[in-house]
Every structure is written in C-alpha cells, then in structure tokens.
Image (tube, rainbow, N blue to C red):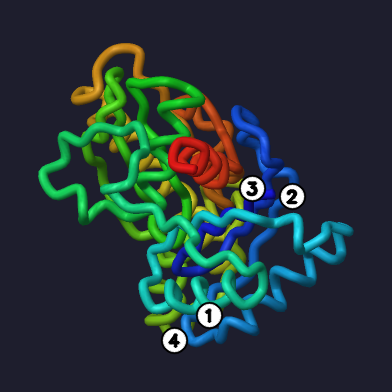
Amino acid sequence: MLIGIDAGNTNITVGLFKDKKGDFTPEYSWRFNTMPNSTADEIAVHIISHIIFNKIDPESIKYAIVSSVVPEIDSVLKKMFLKTFFIEEPLFVNHILDTGLKYTYPMPEEIGADRIVNAVAGNVLYGGPLIIIDFGTATTFCCVSDNGEYMGGQILPGVGLSLNALTGKAAKLSAVKIEKPGSPIGKSTEQSIQAGIFYQTIGSIEKITSLLKEGTGAGTKVLATGGLSVLFSDLSCIDIIDFDLTLKGLKIIHDRNR
C-alpha cells in the first residue's frame, strides 16, 4: 500500500491507497492536528492507531509520499517513515518533481506543495481550464490552463483565521463556531459574527472567481476542496466539490514517479 500525507499548518491529513495504478481514491483517510514540535514517535502513534483500528497490516505499507507546507516537520516525517515503516526515501512534492504540470509562474519554487498537488489532481481528474479553491488555514485560488499550465492564483486568510483575528482582538467578542448562519441578519453577537464571516467569504469567492475567469477563459470550471468547502457547496459559482482532491493528487504524482 501507499501512504500519502498532506502536512498543513492546521491539520495533517493521511490517506492509504491500494497499490493499483489509475485508482486515486484513498481506501482510508483521516486527519489530526499539526503540532510542529511533535516527535517521530508521536506522529507514528496517530498513524499506527488508525492503521490497527482498520485492521491493516503495517508491513503492507511499502511506499510514501508527502505534501508539506510545514518545513520543520519534514525531517520528523522522514524519521517516522524510516522507524515505523522502514521506508528510506519517501517522496516529497515540489516544483521539480515530475507532476505533469507546466509552469507559467515566474518562480515555481515559491508554490506551496499543497497547491501543486491540488493543481495536478484537478487537471488530471477534471481538466482545464480550472480554478481550484482550497478552504484551509488560508483560502487559496489556483488557476490551471486548458494546456495543464499552472498560471498562478490568489491567497487570502482562511475562514478560521478571519474568525480568530476578529474574536482574538476584540475583548467583548467570544469564540464563535464556524457554521452556516440561519439568516444574513444576525440577531445576537454570535450570529452577527457568523453571518459576517460567512458572507464576507462568499463575497470574496464570487468576486475573485469572476476576476480569475477573465484570465483562464471560457469553459473554466471552479473546483472546491478543503474541510470547510462544505459550507459553500451550494454557491452557484462552484461547479465541483472534491473533499479528497489533495490526497488523490498525491496518488497521481506517486504513480508518475514510482
């Protein structure tokens, strides 16, 4: 089996895949909180516990691929793979790797591994031109041309960051759950914050996708992924929701480079 890990600033997402080319959907997937100071053993506990719970033989995991935007955790993951699964050379995604993407981006080395993986999966599974929105710690927009070129995009504070910035700096505003409001008119402080964050995000999505489509051209599809994408799944400007897009991208890239 292949183990794929997407190490983000907030969560680490893990996917297990059958050793079968062309099958990109993870057999199992789960996530846990990113803790940059974690040891290899601590990360191994999170992973092995799920593997054992799902009655998977750890020795069946022979390959590993990682998408990481947390540099300080990379060496820890390498140590964990070696110590736990005896995998000496896990594949780490970067712009140099054979991904099938072309770049019109002037400095591709600046592109986050997660954005590369999403672009690869979007291009292979849905085809360009494409705008990919990832609702993570940051909300990112990536543009892929009809020729499979990574064109660029936008990065803005994610829903959680916006909420934390508001409630953390205002003494009278308590912590509020991130959820879809019942009405755009808040009837309490909590409801007002929920509505404000939600509709602020909607406004950003609608305006940004409209602007980006001017550069990507006719027939552009808008694809959303990330844990909070479910909140915005009924927006008319979003054509496709794929919660496992990043994990699928890891499998696609591994198949190309194995």
The tag earlier along the polypeptide, 4 or 2, is 2
At horizontal 44% and vertical 41% (from top left) the residue drawn is 257
Vertical comparison of 255 with 164: above or below: above
Question: What amino acid does circle 2 point to?
Answer: Tyr
Which of label 3 and label 1 is nearer to you? 1
Query: With respect to residue 55, does 163 lie above or below?
Result: below
Q: Mark 4 to mark 1: distance in Å?
A: 27 Å
Q: Which mark is residue 28?
A: 2
- Judge whether 172 appears above or below 5 on screen: below
Kind of residue indicated by mark 1: Met
What secondary structure is marked by label 1?
A: loop
Q: Is residue 94 left or right of residue 235?
A: left
Residue 109 percent coordinates (x, y): 21, 54
Q: Considering the numbered disc 3 on the image, is that residue within a helix, a strand or a loop?
A: loop
Q: Secondary structure at mark 4?
A: loop
Q: Which of 120 and 11 lies nearest the eye of the viewer? A: 120
Which circle's residue, 4 or 3, is located before the other in the chain? 4
The dot on residue 73 is none
| Distance in Å between CA atoms under marks 3 and 1 | 34 Å
Contact? badges 2 and 1 (CB < 8 Å): no
Q: Earlier in the sequence, mark 4 or mark 1?
A: 1
**What label does residue 35 carry, if any?**
1
Residue beneath disc 3: 182
> How far across and how far down the image is residue 220, in percent?
35, 19
**Circle 4 is placed at which residue position?**
171
Decide which of tag 3 and tag 1 comes sooner along the chain. 1
Of the numbered discs 3 and 2, the one sitting upstream in the chain is: 2
Splitting the image into 4 quarters, where does residue 72 fall? bottom left
Residue at (55, 58) in percent of width and height: 5
* Residue type highlighted by circle 3: Gly
